[in-house]
Amino acid sequence: MRHRIAVVGAGPAGLTFARVLHRHGSPATVLERDTAPHARPQGGTLDLHDALGQRALGKAGLLAEFTRLSRPEGQAMRILDTDGTVLRDWKPRPGERANPEIDRGHLRDLLLGPLHVQWGTTVTEVEPADDGVRVRYADGRTATFDLVIGADGAWSRVRAALSPVTPHYTGVTYLETGIDDIDDRHPELARLIGDGSLAVYGVNRGLVAQRNSGGHVKVYAQFRAPRTWHTDPERHLGLTGWPRVNLADPQAVRALLEALFDGWAPHLLDLLRHGTAFHHRPLHVLPPDHTWTHVPGVTLIGDAAHLMPPLGVGANLAMLEGAELAEALAATDDLDAAVRAFEQTMWERARTFATMTIAGLQRLVSPDPAQAIALFDELQPA
Ligand SMILES: Cc1cc2nc3c(=O)[nH]c(=O)nc-3n(C[C@H](O)[C@H](O)[C@H](O)COP(=O)(O)OP(=O)(O)OC[C@H]3O[C@@H](n4cnc5c(N)ncnc54)[C@H](O)[C@@H]3O)c2cc1C
């Protein structure tokens, strides 16, 4: 019997799920609130690990295409101190493909391939019904499925059908900006960053620049502060005389960041000066041991199930879960047994990574910058 399966969200988790299921000859209804694949910028670059994200792409039959699109040179990593002295300068060995980078937009296109997504479909609620699980859309329509998979990210609407838990703030905020055409317009900054990423760590502050394709660079100013820091920077950030900052005003945000990173080498601050728009990203997480009592017909994958700090794991896990759940469903008629078994595996693995990345964030943006460097030394291949 052909089951009615819906996945909410066309991010890395939802699309990998749908693509692997499609490879096994079964369709899934993909519901996505974005109105089109590139209706909003997809964000920066992702490194896909050979044991996680790349394994998922293998299950989708997309590894060869990934090899063509990804940037192995993007694995390079340079760490500086706040004076601009280079402390570490890792370059990948020739042929090294443990964690190549790919732009999120390219990854979405790669996964989409032949899939039909119901773009512009926002799910507001999921509830058990007599004949399956009913999904309610923002425009008032409803549809019923045998299985609904919530792959709808950090602020999942599907999660409420399974768990009362919501993400909490980590105490660390990122302000993200971007620089276009860096090689032509700012060659000295381009050389500073190199082929991959540049990171600088100070006391409770960090500055990270990551190359994307096409000469674009994403820059993340990272700092420890209460969630409402922008309402009173004098009190929350110790910036004497600073009034409330309008986060929608790039000039005001840039000026505040220059004050916050005052004393760092001027050429490092150019990474902030050349940024155009700034996006406010207070980092939230779910508890590392987040689970739920199994409910037939509904489950979660990816950030919806286990939101963790962005230390290079979230999209990888999301994709592997999507692939593994699709394979499990394709191999059985007993959807519920397959979902139950999958949830146990997902929870156990996610708990390990969530615990690791939460501890990692404590060391990355910390009162002791040496902790951040030690963390990178531990993560770097010998
Ligand atoms: C700055 C930063 C850098 C990161 N870098 C990395 C990295 O290098 N490597 C890595 O592995 N991870 C990284 N991550 C984490 C990674 O981005 C996430 O873990 C990953 O995107 C999770 O995928 P997902 O599919 O579960 O959710 P998402 O990517 O959030 O996708 C969810 C999708 O659901 C849609 N949606 C949401 N609500 C609804 C709704 N109600 N109805 C319909 N559709 C909906 C959204 O529009 C979206 O398309 C980073 C995160 C950040 C913030």
Image (cartoon, grey):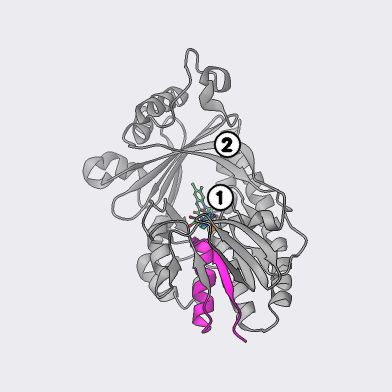
Query: Image point 63% across, 78% down: which residue?
Result: 329
Position above or below: 111 against 221: below
Spot the residue most to the top.
Answer: 241
**Mark 2 residue CB less than 8 A from any atom of ligand 1:** no
The residue stretch that appears in magenta:
1-27
Query: Image point 58% across, 73% down: which residue?
Result: 5
**Label 2 – label 1 distance at C-alpha:** 13 Å
Amino acid type at image mark 2: Val
Tell me residue 186's x, y (percent). 25, 40
CA neighbours of label 2 inside 10 A, class few (<14), some (14 to 19), many (20+): many
Residue 227: in magenta span: no
Report which residue position mark 2 lands on: 172
Residue 4: in magenta span: yes
**Mark 1 residue CB less than 8 A from any atom of ligand 1:** yes
Residue 52 visible in the picture: no
315 or 126, which is in the foreground? 126
Tell me residue 316's x, y (percent). 54, 61
Tell me residue 126's x, y (percent). 63, 60
Say the numbered circle drawn on residue 311: 1
Query: Image point 71% across, 71% down: which residue?
Result: 130
114 or 223, which is in the foreground? 114
Q: Secondary structure at mark 2?
A: strand
CA neighbours of label 1 inside 10 A, class few (<14), some (14 to 19), many (20+): some
Q: Quadrant of residue 345?
A: bottom right
